[in-house]
Image (cartoon, helix red, strand yellow):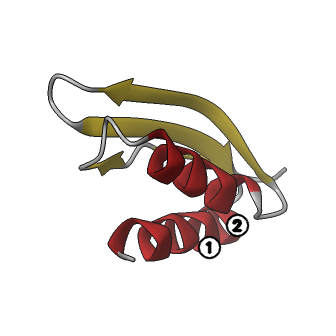
Amino acid sequence: MDKIVECVPNFSEGKDKSIINAISAAVESVEGVKLLDVDPGADFNRTVYTFVGEPEPILEAAFQAAKVGIS
């Protein structure tokens, strides 16, 4: 790896495990990206994801996660 980028998006879903898992799967589906942490917070109904990788794969993983999040 030349450059490593960390991405820490928050999604407004902290209770529905199927949605939380679908977003995780979208991130993990991108080669070169490592999902480090998924922190669901039911009290605030949000989940924080932390993933790392090179810039281009991170951009793709964030895009794939967003597609799941808005569907």
Above or below for 65 versus 42: below
- Residue at point 38%, 42% (across, down): 16
Q: Is residue 51 left or right of residue 16?
A: right
Q: Residue furthest left?
A: 44
- Residue at point 39%, 65% (across, down): 69
Above or below for 10 versus 40: below
Above or below for 28 versus 57: above
Q: Position of residue 64 (x, y in %)?
A: 56, 72
Asked if the residue at tag 1 contacts the one at tag 2, i.e. Cβ–Cβ closer than 8 Å, the answer is yes
Which numbered circle lies on residue 33?
none
Q: Residues within 10 Å of mark 2 (few under 14, many from 20)?
A: some
Q: Is residue 39 left or right of residue 2?
A: left
Q: Position of residue 2 (x, y in %)?
A: 80, 53
Q: Secondary structure at mark 1?
A: helix
Q: Callout 2, which amino acid?
A: Pro
* Residue nearest the viewer, comparing 10 with 55: 10
Quarter residue 66 falls in: bottom left
Q: Secondary structure at mark 2?
A: helix
Which residue has dot 2 on it? Answer: 57
Which residue has dot 1 on it? Answer: 60
